[in-house]
Image (cartoon, rainbow, N blue to C red):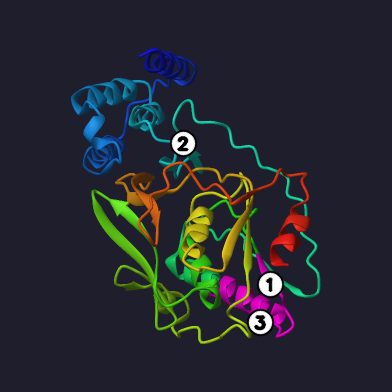
Amino acid sequence: MNRIIILFAIIMNFQNVHSQNNELSRDDKKSIKKMIREFEKKSIYKDSIDWESFEKQVWKSAEFSKDSAVITALTLNGEKHSMYYDQSLKKYLSPVGKDTYNYEEVQPFEADENLGYINLESFINSRTSLDETLKKGAEYINENLQNIKKEDSKNLKGWVIDLRKNNGGNMWPMLISLTPFLENKILGHFLIENKWQVWKKEENQIFDGSSNKTKKFIEEPIEYKLKNKNLKVAVLINNNTASSGEATAIALMSNPNIKFFGDETAGYTTSNNTIHLKNNDILIMTSGVMADHTKKEYWNGITPEFEISPKGDLKGRILEWFN
């Protein structure tokens, strides 16, 4: 109860500071109405929220501004991964009380010549064009595949996949890039409204349910095979590893040769819906949780088997495991 009172005090302070003598447009009113209905239908916490009170408080905040209404809705939803993109301001709005993201400085990993090293960074969709997203995605995938082929050798004693700079975006180009490390099997799940939505590799292609994501981005299956598929793989994670970066880590759990090294991930292990509103703004709303190939759910991120501080002897621990 005290937490709720504090949050409302913060919201009211925000509204007083940012109040605008600004009548909402018809499209903004329609968008707020749709936003409320989408939260009510799809929120991951929909069964524990008083929706009559929720709606009243959002419309009360709308008397100050559209953004006040949005921030109130996000805050009352009580979940940190949902957000709202304001097209006119070109910025994201987040819940009040959400922790400020502090990027963790990453020490470069200097791989020995007998270790294959892949640094898999974020992939962010274009906000303006699906064609641009698909083009960028194909380039991202092909660049990562070329790096894998370049690093691959019969003389390797192991692989290192670095996710420490991967703070999210679109998970599918990431999984497609790692096709050579994944077996033809279930890779993970979204659990949405008590229904399991499967991610899998089938015939060297990545699927989300029945949707062929490989075909969407690069059309052809990835046939490349690692020169030694039985090598150990060390996956590096830390507090920067978030959202789709965490989904990628979960998919890699399906490979029995993999262990995780580093620190706990950011804890954005949920699935989001993208909802386009009448005023051209975008609501990104959490509606499910990620689970691995065994259906183990990850509500609070991923803890590595080998926990190592940012200044610890990461390479030494990995080499010890490989040997």
**Label 2 vs label 3, nearer the camera:** 3
Vertical order, 161 against 261 (above or below): below
Where is residue 157? Give x, y as percent. Answer: 71, 75
The residue that label 1 is drawn on is 158
Predominant SS of the magenta segment: helix
Cα distance between the residues tagged 2 and 3: 41 Å
Q: Characterize the local packing of mark 2: few (<14), some (14-19) or many (20 or more) Cα atoms within 10 angstroms.
A: some
> Label 2 sits on what residue type?
Leu
The residue that label 2 is drawn on is 93
> Label 1 sits on what residue type?
Gly
Where is residue 265? Give x, y as percent. Answer: 56, 46
Does the magenta run of residues contain 149? yes
**Label 3 vs label 1, nearer the camera:** 1
Residue range in magenta is: 138-160
> Label 3 sits on what residue type?
Lys
Among the 4 quarters of the image, the one containing residue 9: top left
Label drawn at residue 149: 3
* Of residues 218 and 287, the one drawn nearer to the viewer in this rendering: 287
Q: Characterize the local packing of mark 1: few (<14), some (14-19) or many (20 or more) Cα atoms within 10 angstroms.
A: many
